[in-house]
Image: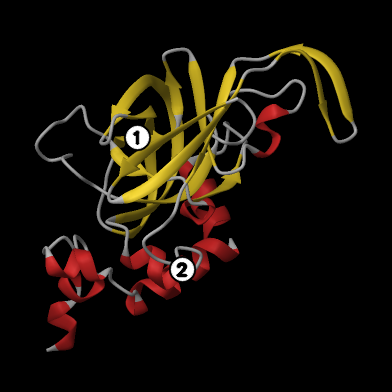
């Protein structure tokens, strides 16, 4: 077991790297399997993103999107591994994105090691891997909250989807639903409803306010209604 610690955005993250080849025993699971080396990334967050008001305030875009395809591996700021996806915008909750956009999700392959966020979950279970739910899945539709850093300056940079579990939720794994059907589905989803209610009452991050990085804040996009 190798422990590797890096500094990211002023926060210490610890990666526990586990090589799995041969017999793996996890709880009631006992199988002979062959998996890639997996690194579990443990994050400390600057705010309580389990609170929807805080999450919406700390995000630049919040939307319902259908994953079109996986574009490949990317390196994110801090030399952290990421995976880029093309996502079709179905409905905006915060911001005004259209068409297909690039999303850079934290976690992915780097030097043959698969980095996943959190405790690993079912990443280590028999038969798991890229389809284990840790990463966005082509054909599936999610509500997700992202930040936009460097997107305007570089068209190959995607909007950043972090590792907090509240930053995305699977709405449908049916690739055949139309955009209208997905909008009807999302309008009934509790998380989507909660995000929409949280937006007017969002709690902005102090650092974003200090540095003028509150893109698409409710106050800035609805200032005329306050007059």
Density class for disc 2 (Cα within 10 Å; few <14, some 14-19, many ≥20) is: many
Q: Which quarter of the figure is the C terminus placed in?
A: bottom left
**Residue 205 in which image quadrant:** bottom left
Pointer 1 residue: 104
Q: Which quarter of the figure is the N terminus placed in?
A: top right
Does any portion of residue 96 appear in the rendered image?
yes
Identity of the residue drawn at 25% across and 54% down? 96
Q: Is mark 2 on a helix, strand or loop?
A: helix
45 lies left or right of 127? left
Pointer 2 residue: 52
**Residue 65 in which image quadrant:** top left
219 lies left or right of 59? left
Q: What element carries label 1?
A: strand
Residue projecting furthest to the bottom: 227
Q: Which of 226 and 159 is in front in this view?
A: 159
In this picture, is 188 found above or below 108? Answer: below
Query: Spatial distance from mark 1 to mark 2, Cα to Cα?
Result: 21 Å
Q: Residue 30: x, y in percent?
A: 88, 23
């Amino acid at each position: 077991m190798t422990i590797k610690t890096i500094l990211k955005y002023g926060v210490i993250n610890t990666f526990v790297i586990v090589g799995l080849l041969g017999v793996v025993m996890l709880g009631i699971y006992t199988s002979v399997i062959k998996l890639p080396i997996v690194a579990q990334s443990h994050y400390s967050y600057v705010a309580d993103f389990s609170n929807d008001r805080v999450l919406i305030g700390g995000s630049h875009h919040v939307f319902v999107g259908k994953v079109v395809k996986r574009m490949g591996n990317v390196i994110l700021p801090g030399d952290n591994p990421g995976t880029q996806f093309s996502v079709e915008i179905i409905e905006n909750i915060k911001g005004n994105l259209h068409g297909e956009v690039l999303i850079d999700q934290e976690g992915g392959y780097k030097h043959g090691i698969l980095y996943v966020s959190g405790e690993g979950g079912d990443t280590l279970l028999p038969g798991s891997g890229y389809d284990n739910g840790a990463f966005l899945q082509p054909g599936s539709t999610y509500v997700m909250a992202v930040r936009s850093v460097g997107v305007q300056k570089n068209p190959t940079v995607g909007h950043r989807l972090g590792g907090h579990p509240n930053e995305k939720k699977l709405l449908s794994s049916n690739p055949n639903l139309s955009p209208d059907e997905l909008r009807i589905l999302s309008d009934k989803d509790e998380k989507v409803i909660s995000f929409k209610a949280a937006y007017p009452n969002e709690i902005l991050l102090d650092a974003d306010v200090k540095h003028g990085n509150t893109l698409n804040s409710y106050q800035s996009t609805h200032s005329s209604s306050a007059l």
